[in-house]
Image (cartoon, grey):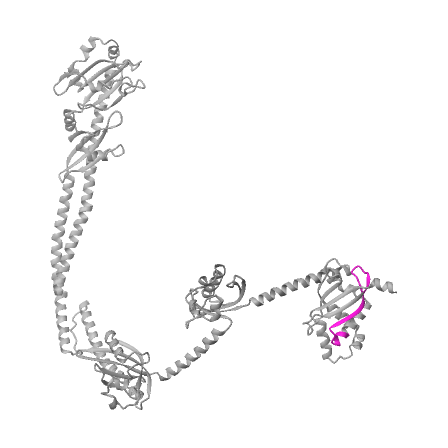
Amino acid sequence: MSLRQKTIIIIGLTFIGLTVLLYTISRFIVLASFSQLEGKNTAENVTRARNVILDELVGLNSTASDWSNWDDTYAFVQDANEQYIGDNLDTSVLINLRLNLMLFVDTSGRVVFGKAVDLVTEQEMPPPPSLLAQLSPDNLLLRHPDLKSSISGIILLPEDPILVVSQPILTNAGTGPSRGTLIIGRYLDASEIQYLAELTHLSLHLNRFDDPKVQTARTTLSAEVPIFIQPLDTQTVVGYGLLTDIYGQPALIIQVDMPREIYQQGQASVSYLMGSLVAVGLIFGAIILLLLEQQVLSRLTRLSQRVSEIGVSGDLSARVPTTSEDELSHLARAINTMLGSLEQSEHALREQTRRNELILQTSLDGFMVWDINGQLREVNPAFCRILGYPQKGLLGMHLSDLQVQENIAGTTTQSHFEAILKTGADRFETKYRHQDGHLIDVEVSLNFVEFGQDRFFFGFLRDISERKHIEAALAKEHNLLRTLIDNLPDSIYVKDTAGRHLLVNHAAAKGAAIATREEMLGKTDLDLYPPEVARQRYADDLAVIQSGQPLLNQEEVSFDQHGRTTWDLTTKVPLRDSNGKVVGLIGITRDITVRKRTEAALRTGEERYRSLFENLPIAVMEQDFSVIKTYIEKLQGQGVNDFRAYFGSHPDAVTNCAQRVKLLNMNKASLELYEARSKEELTRGLPQIFNQKSYEVFKDLLIAIVQGKTRVEQETINRTLKGTQKNLALSWSVVPGYEETFSKVLVSLVDVTEHKRLKE
């Protein structure tokens, strides 16, 4: 299909589519507006029809008021005098008043007088029995709550619906008491409806509410929706109005039939509009086609012919003519630019071919071309160098002369060629035979191509002998590392970002009570350990992975297969890929159950020692002599050898040393001995307990330390915090394990004052 035909079809379809769209929019918008206007007009006419019936009731009310508020009527309803009947209730009176009915009812509900007239035949007829049957004292028509009461409305009678008005019978002045009720009525029969139709200039019909002819209107009309509009066809629209009886119940449906003049006018307007649009569209379409033909299509045809001529000639240096500065001229210039680019590309292709040939000739990988029969047709120098053959010696050789029939993976050469024929390409490792006979490990990459009738395989050959040696060495190292990991007593494991085990050693499997390492792979701690243990470990895994921060030397509580508590010391570090992204974690867990139990035993022993220490009956103190030890070693380093002479000439050194002793702890007996209330009070008051004799004894203790003694027994004299002087037997000993620093020394003191006094 030519561009010209496509243009005509596109313009035509666009015009048709727009026309259909405009018609649809007009139908939905314009006709909808006319329909709304028609409905509004019909509703107004239905309202007029309902109002004219209500106006009839107003007129009847006025007539009833004239007759009920009259002294003659007031007297008549009591005495029923014939003169009132003769003077006022002649048939002609009812005809002139357009009344079908007039009833005079006393207060007991008895009809004093009643008269009915057929207004069509102008003949008297009996009052309707169906109405008389309703006139009980408690009937709405006879119940007037006050003297100004007036009851009016519609009553459905078997004969016809009737407009009735009921008012109390009073005097001319409108005073009472009421002597009864005056009821007048007018049938809504065919003649009355015709009269109302002529009065309103409307086509009116009156239907009972239960008439099947108005079934649709009856289901729609209500006190809230008193009017219903229904188009019957394109010519007629009907409006329905609800009329209720004097009891407030739906009684009648007034029907107004109207011609659809407004809607028909809307249809005519839409038709005129669409006709005008079609005519204008056809004219503009013809003009557009003519302009397109002159300015676009004919020029495109000439441009296409010129491009075809260049394509047939193959002369990429030829160009298409450009005549103006519009889009088609820009297209022509673009074509010329493309022809220039193609000319440059052709030149570049020749250069690329030459470069590719150079690359193949200088490539370190061997290049080869085999025909479909497995004959070698083309090779590069690298292929010759790898296999040790001259180029002429290789061309024409069969694949079986060079490649061993079974490669490294155990598959045959034939299976590789079959795979290449199916998929178009294959990569595999195999062995080729060198000219001197030894085998070479090679990686072969082959592709299958077809050019017309020619089918062949081409690809590259890479010597991977050195890589194979490296892989073997790496495999050996991997085996050594695997052996080391598997024989370590600590649990070693690697997990992915979901906490699943990727690698574990035997110790890890044993710690999880798993028979083999393989059973742990792919499982998380939630699958392997009790819930109370697994949840915390799994949370630790996710914390390390999400934060990228290591978890170092964390103690964890677990349970062995017998339910006994065990302790582990765990370190977990994030595992990152080459881009630094966390891809898992590496963990090491050591069983420290023995250490924890030993520590617990030590704590128990320490507690027992503390209890014994506190409750000994003799005074015991823990003191730190590390500063004294360092001071003495310093003096020795300065060349002091005779410490007795030194301390004799430097008494302040003894005092200074005594003040530098640190009191670490003391028991209750110590507080009692020195009459101290607390350990803090005794610590603050230590300088008070020394006297001259005390410093002499302390000097002897310093000389014993110089001599290397770790146990000394002396007698000394101290003062209590209250000033009491006591003779004491002192035992000073370094705690085993602290001989190098003297940082923990036990001093026990026994009060021998009384013993000394008795001895003296």
Measuring from the top left, give residue 527's x and y in whole percent.
Answer: 44, 62
Above or below, 261 relative to 554: above
- Is residue 754 depicted above or below 706 in this figure? above
Q: Check the picture and name the quadrant holding the N terminus.
A: bottom left
- Rendered location of residue 6, percent (x, y): 14, 62
Q: Nearer the viewer, residue 593 or 319?
A: 593
| Quarter that holds the C terminus | bottom right
Q: Is residue 399 visible?
A: yes
Q: Quadrant of residue 103?
A: top left
Q: Nearer the viewer, residue 427 or 611?
A: 611
Asked if one can make out residue 554 in the rendered structure from this viewpoint, the answer is: no
Residue 736 point in image, percent of width and height: 69, 71
| 595 relative to 278, above or below | below
Q: Viewed as shown, does residue 317 lie left or right of 720?
A: left
Q: How many marks?
A: 0
Q: Position of residue 696 (x, y in %)?
A: 81, 70
Task: Tell me the residue at 68%/73% (across/down).
Answer: 741
Say left or right for 12 vs 525: left
- Is 110 within the magenta? no
Where, by quadrant of the figure, is residue 462 drawn?
bottom left
In the image, the segment drawn in magenta is 703-727
Q: Nearer the viewer, residue 581 or 535?
A: 535
Location of residue 53 by image quarter: top left
Q: Nearer the viewer, residue 198 or 629?
A: 629
Q: 646 above or below 108? A: below
